[in-house]
Amino acid sequence: MKPRDRILSRLRHGRAASPAAPYPAPQAQATADSAPDIDAMVTALQAAHAEVFRMDESAWPDHLASLAEQRAWQQWWVGRDEVASTWQAHGSAPSVTVFEDWERQKSTLFESAPIGLSLAQGGIADTGTLIVESGSAVPRTLSLVPPVHVVVVRENSLFPDMATAMVHYSRHGMPTNLIFISGPSKTADIQQTMAYGAHGPRELIVYLCR
Amino acid sequence: MSGFTNHPDQDFGVRIHDALGDAELRESFHGAMTFLRDRRRAQFPDPEALETLRDSGAAIRDRALAQLPDLLEQLEDRCRHNGIQVHWAETAEDANRIITGLIRAVNGKRIVKGKSMATEEIGLNTALEAAGFTCLESDMGEYIVQQAHETPSHIIMPAIHRNKASIARQFAEQIPDTPYTEDVDELIGTGRRVLRRAFAEADVGISGVNFAVAETGTLCLVENEGNGRMSTTVPDTHIAVMGLEKVIEKLADLPDLMRLLPKSATGQAITTYVNMISGPRRDDESDGPRQVHLVLLDNGRSRIYADRQLRATLRCIRCGACMNHCPVYERLGGHAYGTVYPGPIGQVVMPQLFGLDHAGKLTQACSLNGACGEVCPVRIPLPDLIRRLRHEGVSTDPASPVRGHGRQRRFSEALIWRVWCFIHTRPPLYRLVTRVATRARHWLPPLPRAWTRHRAPLQPADRSFQEMMRHREDRRS
């Protein structure tokens, strides 16, 4: 017998030898059928040390251009999503690198990519979470490797809570990598002192767009 | 069976004595445990809602365990369908052999690892070293601990026993071009710098799994730092190692478990990252691993599963709340246990994995105060299980399901209880013995030093309780 079959047979035998009724489930609570609480999303993201800006979708590029000027942000790394093409076409003529060839660009991404800019496919309002799906348009590492991550997310793509988000993915299937992001990377591993930018971005800038 | 070479029972007393005498260690743990308890409490303001949520957590985990073999088959099937290769390991040695083989097959040279208790349990780092590989721990706490040739002292916060001054000294001594600083941001920055290079160059990434969803063939990892995402995204090969009990039925089970795990563990509403992996990079994707492997680890779990009461051990979601609330753990710290899993859950898991002959003494390091059972997010009856294992430790029943049962039995202790039982089941004899003991109390032999070293010596009262009560009633009438 193979290890797999031996393990499964031990489990089946053990279950048959001492059957037990599972712990009873509590009465199902009414699932949140309400609209996503945008204010809660903003509060949760800010509490997690993210910067949040709310505006109409047409306004973020101009706002980001002035923010970039204030903070002397110059070099942008993008994928091939709508946000990337909007930003590349912006009047401030930002210097943009399209991240598309992992083998060729990987070491540059790690060594000298200061800012990643991408669109989040959705969000979860009550926990202040951005949902990023892997796919052909956006590399997974764009939201992870650059020290600053700027994300655009549309209010109409938000779920009220994780339960509704899971219903969606159960129905429509999972991408190869589904990532929930709820703030900049952080750690409290040294004497319970919170430090940001442990391995991922130090700063998370969120444009919450109508 | 692990990176810990000795059996936990060996020198347990010595380690306890040393830990209690280490003022710096006790201060570290007292501070950290108070911090974690306060943060958890703040996350659960409504006690009624918390109890309902714990019911739900227990029910989800129990439902999964009730279908465990079927869910594992479904998980394997869905994973294969998604392009994740599944391997089954009966023992720690099997798991290490499988992982070493996978690394050799892709000609792996540089290996990074995200925090994983399952790989600590099988002693993977030691096995990889023996096979000629070095595996760099990438969680900040694990990195600090590995660099100092230590083991984690807490399952969520591995370097909790260290203060920033000692970490500052370590970094300045061991990492080139690193000046001494106690600034935590700078220390983390140093770790980030070293580990980034390692991520960029790694060809194999190893991780654990928090939950595996059978419905979709999804591996779910929670973390704050991003090292887990790095380890599972950047290297060409990702190997995930998971105890086979971590499977859950469906995506809809995740939200309640996610409401329990980070809040119970570190007092966070949600971790920075929830990383759900359902396959390697597709052809149209520009990054992500080309191969994803899942190693399903038994290592004694199927034996635990076979006992109706002990099966609850497998509900555990490894949050660490039981140790954070354990008065014994708070005073000893994690290393004194000498086990991969310390604290109450360790006192229940380790004797079942190692056998009561080698880890049975662990169950004695408990005052049965019940705090662990009251905070467990999936309602594992930890105090009951500790009591059960104490019983199995001295049980002579040949049908006992726990390995090494009866091996904690001592002739002298058994004799004392036999005598105690003989006296207490014979009322006239009991009255005689208590009468003699109270009258002769000044001439009784002294108690053993094990008792009197830290406590006042005990002496019987001048009258037995029964006598006092009788006297009281006589006076009333």
Image (spheres, coloured by chain):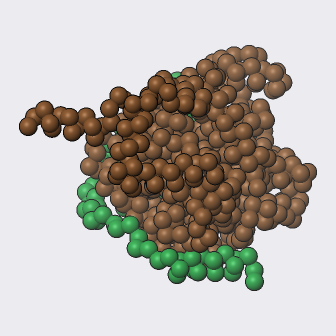
Which residue does the image show at 66% across and 56% down from the upper left? Answer: B407
Q: Is residue B50 left or right of residue B353?
A: left
Query: Residue A176, position in %: x, y?
Result: 60, 64
Q: Quadrant of residue B452?
A: top right
Q: From this viewpoint, is residue A123 visible?
A: no
Total numbered labels: 0
Q: From this viewpoint, is residue B425 visible?
A: yes
Q: Is residue A207 left or right of residue A8?
A: left
Which residue does the image show at 20% across and 34% down from the upper left? Answer: B471
Quarter of the figure with the N terminus of chain B: bottom right
Q: Is residue A11 left or right of residue B257?
A: right
Nearest the eye: B306 or B404? B404
Chain A's colour is: green
Q: Among all residues in the image, which is located at the extreme right?
A: B132
B218 in relation to A43, above or below: below
Quarter of the figure with the C terminus of chain B: top left
Q: Is residue B474 left or right of residue A81?
A: left
Which residue does the image show at 10% across and 34% down from the upper left? Answer: B476
Nearest the eye: B380 or B67? B380
Q: Among all residues in the image, which is located at the extreme left?
A: B477
Chain B's colour is: brown
Query: Residue B142, position in %: x, y?
Result: 69, 39
Nearest the eye: B87 or B94? B94
Query: Residue A152, position in %: x, y?
Result: 47, 46
Which residue does the image show at 56% across and 72% down from the upper left? Answer: B306
B340 in relation to B309, above or below: above
